[in-house]
């Protein structure tokens, strides 16, 4: 491929010319290419951040009394047999977290006990048949196998993570390992090269390259990890420059795909391993080139640093769409956001990241990888960051994904927060949810998006929309004449109009196009937050073609199928005529819902939750309210009013 044929996006425009030649001249040597001091710099590592080290040491010392996690072949094969992938993945994640803990303890102490622990962990990874996660491996499709084909490694998220972990470890502990276990670093280089770097360069049909125009979070995640491995582990200057050039081209495709408003269609949870990874990779590239390849050469990438705080509802709750969680488990790598916000000069994003920095708490943990932990431990600006309030902007409108979020007043989660989503049903990690709403009370979702359960083979297979959390029937949208929304880009909102002003915030759209029915003329939906009253008002107005009766059908089948408005709620539910009351989770208060015409009957159905990911967010159940508007005929209107209830106010005619 010639330079003229290469992809030319924002990075190519910022760094024109023969990029490989430019990189060959600009790249610093491998031992200085990663922006973390190695263990030989004792002024840094003899006394690192005490609360962080204390927690790592406690867990690492516990590791010494237990065997190393052992991923088994039958666990790998289960994905291809019955779709179960989580058991194998959790074992390999535990193995990598243990190695990360040991690496930090070895850098701090240089104690042979911890160096032996590192040697054991590295060797186990090097002997692991595959670094790929089974759900991503093409071993079955290409080789007919259910176990890794070691002669044809697949480069995926898992392989990139291990390659980068070993590169960071080599950088951190190179000299101590040379003295303690000669030959180990050569093994690292051999395994990373054969499993990741050579396949990355030679096989250019990886779906995550985005050559078909579909670029998603895999691209910066894998390219960023490959960049770490190349910079540290490749000694040949021409090859090193050529590989970095391929990485830059891959990052360029991702950056070019970002919308101008910085939104991520995969949602908040995927920002950390998508746009955030792109920021980290470009920061690393700036360091490794001595500033020659510096800057954030796209406004869209700059704007992405605001996306996390724009999706914040309050506390540890977030607006989730696609496969995101409303309450993500575990901490996030806040230092990475803090660093990105500093680079682009976003003061709100900087304040939002700093709001999660508590002086007596660890600066990071091993959950998000060795590299991120090392960067946090050696970032004085993050360590000394002063916590403050989260920004909580009053209004957020992201036209690229047609998401509106509005609260009563900026800076406070008090009262009701409304979020509405238009868009289409062909998004990354898509759920069929065009027109769905989320309503939070004092920062806690009450009218909710369930999120996604534990991943299995079904999640990304042909049965994806048999999973209840992905279906429109379990989102807050109409169910029209027995029909759910359909997946695909063509099933989309129409005539979308967003309004934000001092009095109200509203999203108005026609959701008819999301349904595979030709007889839905329109289904207008207006979702409005009234700031003066603090209420949310949802107005559905529809016009359907007259139902044509089949004279030959049995009587029971001659009537039009039922039409309902669904609302999925979290908390304790009480129903009355034309109204419902929900006692929210986390003691957030009570939400009252009333609708007109009040004659529309409402039925509540309980969804028992057993999946551990959903249990951690919602507890053991969610409730779906189904307001039946079938009797209103082919044209009608339903108005639902939601409001916070005072603590002692009776709403259903009895005590609260």
Image: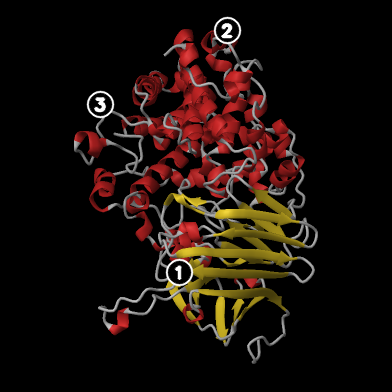
Viewer-side label of 1, 2? 1
Residue 61 spot, x, y in % from top left? 49, 44
Q: Identify the image quadrant of the N terminus.
A: top left
Residue 176 visible: no
Residue 338 visible: yes
Hey, which residue is sitting farthest left in the picture? 144
Could you tell me which secondary element the residue under label 1 belongs to?
A: loop
> Relative to the observer, which residue lies in front, 242 or 506?
506
Q: Which residue is mark 3?
A: 151
Residue 559 spot, x, y in % from top left? 37, 79
Q: Which residue is mark 2?
A: 25
- Residue 369 higher or lower than 151, as above or below: below
- Residue 569 is labelled as none
Marks 3 and 1, how far apart at CA: 60 Å
Q: How would you rate the neighbour count of disc 2 (Cα within 10 Å): few for under 14, some for 14-19, many for 20 or more?
A: some
Residue 341 spot, x, y in % from top left? 70, 37
Could you tell me which secondary element the residue under label 3 belongs to?
A: loop
Could you tell me which secondary element the residue under label 2 belongs to?
A: helix
> Relative to the observer, which residue lies in front, 560 or 195?
560
Residue 351 spot, x, y in % from top left? 75, 45
390 lies left or right of 209: right
Q: Which residue is mark 1?
A: 545
**Rendered residue at 59%/11% (across/down):** 26
512 lies left or right of 11: left
Viewer-side label of 2, 3? 2
């Amino acid at each position: 491929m010639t330079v003229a044929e290469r992809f030319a996006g924002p990075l190519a425009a910022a760094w024109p010319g023969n990029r490989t030649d430019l990189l060959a001249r600009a790249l610093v040597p491998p031992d200085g290419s990663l922006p973390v001091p190695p263990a030989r710099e004792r002024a840094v590592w003899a006394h690192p951040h005490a609360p962080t080290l204390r927690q790592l040491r406690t867990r690492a010392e516990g590791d010494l009394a237990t065997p190393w996690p052992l991923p088994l072949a039958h666990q790998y094969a289960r994905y291809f047999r019955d779709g179960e992938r989580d058991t194998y993945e959790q074992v390999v994640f535990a193995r990598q977290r243990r190695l990360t803990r040991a690496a930090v303890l070895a850098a701090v102490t240089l104690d042979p006990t911890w160096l032996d622990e590192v040697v054991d962990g590295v060797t186990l990874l090097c002997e692991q048949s595959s670094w790929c996660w089974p759900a991503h491996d093409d071993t079955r499709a290409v080789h007919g196998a259910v176990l890794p084909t070691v002669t044809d490694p697949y480069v995926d998220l898992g392989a990139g993570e291990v390659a980068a972990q070993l590169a960071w470890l080599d950088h951190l502990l190179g000299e101590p390992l040379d003295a303690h276990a000669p030959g180990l670093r050569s093994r690292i280089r051999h395994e990373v090269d054969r499993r990741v770097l050579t396949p990355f360069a030679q096989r250019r049909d990886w779906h995550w390259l985005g050559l078909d125009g579909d670029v998603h979070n895999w691209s910066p995640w894998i390219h960023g990890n490959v960049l770490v491995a190349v910079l540290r582990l490749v000694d040949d200057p021409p090859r090193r420059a050529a590989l970095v050039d391929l990485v830059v081209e891959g990052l360029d495709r991702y950056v070019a795909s970002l919308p101008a408003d910085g939104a991520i269609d995969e949602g908040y949870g995927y920002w950390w391993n998508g746009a955030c990874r792109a920021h980290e990779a470009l920061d690393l590239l700036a360091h490794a080139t001595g500033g020659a390849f510096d800057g954030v050469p796209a406004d869209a990438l700059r704007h992405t640093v605001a996306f996390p705080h724009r999706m914040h509802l309050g506390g540890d709750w977030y607006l989730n769409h696609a496969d995101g969680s409303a309450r993500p488990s575990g901490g996030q790598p806040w230092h990475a956001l803090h660093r990105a916000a500093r680079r682009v000069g976003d003061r709100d994003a900087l304040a939002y990241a700093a709001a999660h920095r508590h002086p007596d708490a660890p600066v990071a943990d091993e959950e998000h990888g060795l590299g991120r932990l090392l960067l946090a431990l050696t970032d004085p600006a993050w360590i000394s960051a002063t916590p403050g309030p989260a920004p909580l902007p009053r209004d957020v409108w992201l036209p690229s994904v047609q998401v509106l979020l509005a609260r009563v007043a900026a800076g406070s989660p008090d009262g009701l927060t409304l979020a509405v989503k238009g868009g289409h049903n062909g998004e990354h990690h898509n759920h069929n949810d065009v027109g769905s709403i989320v309503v939070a009370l004092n920062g806690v979702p009450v009218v909710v998006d369930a999120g996604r359960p534990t991943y299995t083979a079904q999640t990304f297979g042909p049965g994806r929309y048999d999973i209840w959390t992905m279906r429109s029937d379990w989102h807050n949208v109409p169910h029209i004449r027995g029909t759910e929304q359909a997946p695909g880009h063509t099933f989309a909102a129409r005539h979308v109009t967003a309004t934000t002003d001092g009095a109200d915030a509203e999203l108005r759209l026609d959701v008819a196009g999301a349904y595979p029915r030709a007889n839905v003329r329109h289904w207008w939906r207006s979702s409005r937050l009234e700031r003066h009253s603090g209420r949310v008002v949802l107005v559905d107005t529809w016009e359907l073609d007259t139902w044509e009766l089949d004279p030959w059908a049995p009587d029971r089948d001659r009537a039009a199928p039922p039409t309902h408005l669904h609302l999925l709620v979290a908390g304790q539910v009480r129903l009355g005529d034309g109204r419902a009351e929900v006692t929210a989770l986390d003691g957030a208060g009570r939400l009252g819902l009333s609708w007109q015409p009040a004659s529309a009957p409402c039925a509540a159905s309980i969804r028992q939750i057993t999946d551990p990911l959903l249990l951690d967010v919602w507890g053991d159940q969610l409730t779906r309210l189904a307001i039946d508007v079938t009797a209103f005929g082919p044209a009608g209107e339903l108005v639902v009013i939601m409001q916070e209830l005072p603590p002692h106010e009776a709403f259903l005619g009895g005590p609260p």
